[in-house]
Amino acid sequence: MDAFPIFLSLRVAAVSTLLAGLLGVGLAWVLTRRRFPGRALLESILLLPLVLPPTVVGFYLLILLGRSGPLGATLEAAGMEIVFTWRAAVIAAAVASLPLVVKAVQAAFEGVDPRIEAAARTLRSAPSVFLTVTLPLAWRGILAGLILAFARGLGEFGITLMLAGSIPGRTQTLALAIYDAVQGNDLAQANWLAFTTVVIVVGLLWLLNRLPRVRL
Amino acid sequence: MLDFSFEYRAGGFVVAPALTADRGLTALYGPSGAGKSLTLLCLAGLLRPTAGWIRLNGRTLLDVSAGIQVPPHRRRVGVVFQEYALFPHLPVAGNLAYGLVGVGRVEVEERVQAMLRLLRLEDFGRRYPGELSGGQRQRVALGRGLIIQPELLLLDEPFSALDQMERERLRDEVMDLLSGFGGTTLLVTHSLQEAYRMATTIAVIDDGRILQAGPRDEVLRRPRDRRVAEHVGASNLFRGTVMRVAAAAHVSWQGAALTVAADLPETGTTVDCCIRPESVRLVWPERIEGRANLLRGRLTSEVKRGIDYLLRFQADVGGGEISISCPEHLHSLMKVQPGMEGWISLPPDQLHVLEPVEDR
């Protein structure tokens, strides 16, 4: 049994969750607490990966990050290869899970009473209020968003295939390896990979439901 | 001393209050939508005025033209919000200690303990706000504002979330806690009764502007103009003309000559006067001798208002209407009933001449 796809997927999901988490919390805060022109547009763009076919998202990412793409060329000049490496899988997973994080965290921030933040603001500086009041009051929703992001990152297929390919031992993640195994009629490998995935995801959902509630 | 004059625009609504408030409790009284809470948020630094300045005991908190805007947590201003806005994830002690930044651990502990004693919540330091009664929450909110030793304390409708019984009790409790506070307190309220009960100074605000500020009795009995008179319940308004017979000036209203204790402008000027319904006297028919501003007429209606009756009186001369607040004992003593004929007197020292409302 080849366990490489499991470890690769766990690593990809962990790094992409971190990326999507940091970016998502920031974007969600901006979207809930700031009014600026183009806010609705930004919100719609952020939701695109949720509604577009993954191959379409993957296609545009490929154009953007490919060797001759505007971003890809710059990164390659800086010595960082993206396309068809494990980093591409991370980006694919992060893009796929970002809307989930933003939506969940937005709802969490909206649940924080702005008067409580205002009261805190009269006593401490704005960054301190964010860390000691806003985040603790929203942490359950944020954690839920991160768990969803991790699960989504673990199972990412379409964008990953477009951007990272399915190179065994290099970029072949869980979802890709299962597909590959089924294609190659290796049902035993497909079975154990699929079962492992179910165990991980069920474990995460169990964790999500056990999160203690903040007393209000 | 708090001293400010600023302007804040919210959509089409302009709030432009100016006020000087000494140590002690000043009530910012006005109807909902008058701009009370916006004023308070500007003073706390949570909203940014578009022009003007705020000074607190000689310190400049805001000066838009000089580009000075002290952030909220550096203003030494404590705020007690409507419905308290306590931190639900922190215990009572944590709520109290929240504003003590840059204070040593031992001193924080001491000050929190001292505040818990003052609030009579010694055993509640580890409890969470969700486990407290309304009154206890209110005390924690007040303590959270006071523990930072502010120079200005802002109270935003602190009793609005409570029922009548609790409100009475907590008002006394808050007054008690505030008696040890040496700074300036600004109480935002839409209840005239509350403003009068708690504050020594009342500032009447409407349409985003302070219409009048002064000692509470002065504001109630000597409102500056018609608008203030309406807000403070000096609901009997008379528009008359200044007349002079020999050297004595009076106001001619609906054919009646009303004597006023204050100086009057020149003959022929149109003036508005007001008198509070409580200040109008019902006069026994056999005692009308020597009474000033005596009017004969008929009681047209009465409304029982709990502790008093509000009577409507129609004067025989000109048919002018006057409201009278009549205490219950007097009501039964004089056997007052709608339809009865009688006399009323408007004491000249209670009949107050208003300034004309300035147009803006």
Image (cartoon, coloured by chain):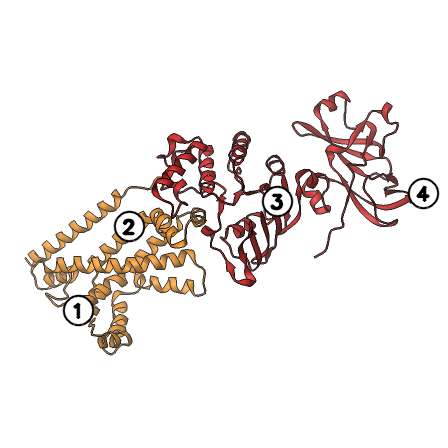
Chain colours: A orange, B red
Label 1: state its secondary structure. Answer: loop
Q: Is residue B285 left or right of residue B125?
A: right
Residue that badge 4 annotates:
B246
Q: CA distance from mark 3 to mark 4?
A: 45 Å
Q: CA distance from mark 4 to mark 2?
A: 87 Å
Q: Nearer the viewer, residue A127 or B107?
A: B107
Q: Are marks 2 and 3 in contact (CB under 8 Å)?
A: no
Q: Nearer the viewer, residue A6 or B274?
A: B274
User: How far across and how far down the image is residue B212, in percent?
Assistant: 67, 47
Q: Is B28 situated above or below A36?
A: above
Q: Check the residue under mark 2 and report the chain it is in.
A: A
Mark nearer the viewer, 3 or 4: 4
Q: Is residue A216 visible?
A: no
User: How far across and how far down the image is residue B123, in percent?
Assistant: 38, 30
Label 2: state its secondary structure. Answer: helix
Residue that badge 1 annotates:
A85
Residue that badge 2 annotates:
A143
**In the orientation shown, which residue stands out farthest toward the left?**
A1
Residue that badge 3 annotates:
B31
Q: Indicate the amino acid at tag 1.
A: Thr
Q: Indicate the amino acid at tag 2.
A: Leu
Q: CA distance from mark 1 to mark 4?
A: 107 Å
**Mark 1 neighbour class, 10 Å CA radius: few under 14, some 14 to 19, many 20 or more:** some
Q: Check the residue under mark 1 and report the chain it is in.
A: A
Q: Is residue A140 left or right of residue A40?
A: left
**Which residue is located at x 42 percent, y 56 percent?**
A33
Q: Indicate which disc residue B167 carries.
A: none
Whether labels 2 and 3 belong to a single chain: the reply is: no
Q: Quadrant of residue B297?
A: top right
**Mark 3 neighbour class, 10 Å CA radius: few under 14, some 14 to 19, many 20 or more:** some
